[in-house]
Image (tube, grey):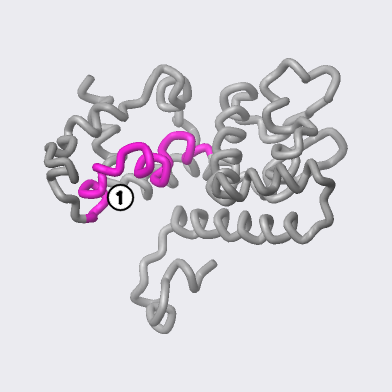
Amino acid sequence: VLPRVVGGGRIQDLSGTKITRVELYDEFVEQWLERGKRRVGENEPSPQAKAAFDTLLDGGFTQTGIDFLKRLAGAIYKEQAGHPVVEYSRLRDKETWKTAFFSRDDETHLLREACPLIRNGNQFRFIHQSLLEYCFTLAVFDPQESRSLDPSLGLVYGKSVDPTSSDGKQGVPEEESVSNQQPGVDHPLIWRSFVGEPSILAFLAERVQQEPHFKRQLQGMIER
């Protein structure tokens, strides 16, 4: 994880390199999923599983895995008040939220196998509490998702953006872009209090420092 975080020659002078916890977790989860993709791809799957794996590859396996973890963490906090262990019974829970994550569907099974999750009988959990907390903060704000939803936010993320599009129309003003992505009623910031959640707050505080757009979103919520 560390070489990819610091990059190139910076690894020779770690004393002067500031690495945040959220950066380490970003890289850890991405690398875990990349290794998981290789592992499940090296198996000898059934034709159905092979088709499911190809579908996941077409959709971007790693990013799909991150989305899976983000949704699972959000569901754990919303449906179980953050209790980390999920018990799943195929018969009892087939009509519940748990089916989306623990069914025998080929794509779901492959994602679950590639993700940092532990299974003990009919119980599932993240390999560490801090990973559950980190993935929940992605449900609050996911930088990759925010960029993909609105490419015009490049300037907000420190990238240069042409103020006009290829057809000559003006780009979306920064204030309008931020306003358009304000959290809705189902957003974790609406239904979850982070009081007494120091680890989650620490992740979010670091994300705010890295992502000016997230900071503007929070300011917009306060001003509403």
Is residue 102 within the magenta segment? Answer: no
Is residue 145 within the magenta segment? Answer: yes
Residue 36 falls in which quadrant of the image? bottom right
Counting other residues with Cα less than 10 Å from the Cα at mark 1, is it few (<14), some (14-19), or many (20 or more)?
A: few
Residue 217 falls in which quadrant of the image? top left
| Numbered marks: total | 1
Give the residue displayed 63% in from the left and 45% down from the top: 56
Please tell me which residue lies in front, 114 or 213: 114
Residue located beneath label 1 in the image: 209
Q: Is residue 42 above or below residue 189?
A: below
Give the residue displayed 57% in from the left and 43% down from the top: 64
Instruction: Give the x, y percent position of residue 149.
Output: 36, 37
Please tell me which residue lies in front, 179 or 189: 179
Task: Please identify the quadrant where the C terminus is shown.
Answer: top left
Q: On the picture, is 180 further left or further right than 200?
A: left
Q: On the picture, is 2 further left or further right than 190?
A: right
Q: Is residue 119 above or below residue 74?
A: below
Going by the picture, which residue comes out furthest to the front?
167
**Magenta stretch, residue numbers:** 136-159
Give the residue displayed 78% in from the left and 19% down from the top: 93
Task: Please identify the quadrant where the N terminus is shown.
Answer: bottom right
Q: On the picture, is 67 further left or further right than 189?
A: right
Give the residue displayed 55% in from the left and 31% down from the top: 74
Q: Secondary structure at mark 1?
A: helix
Q: Is residue 31 above or below residue 145?
A: below
The secondary structure that dominates the magenta segment is: helix
Q: Is residue 197 above or below residue 207?
A: above
Instruction: Give the x, y percent position of residue 163.
Output: 13, 45
The amino acid beneath tag 1 is Gln
Q: On the picture, is 112 further left or further right than 69?
A: right
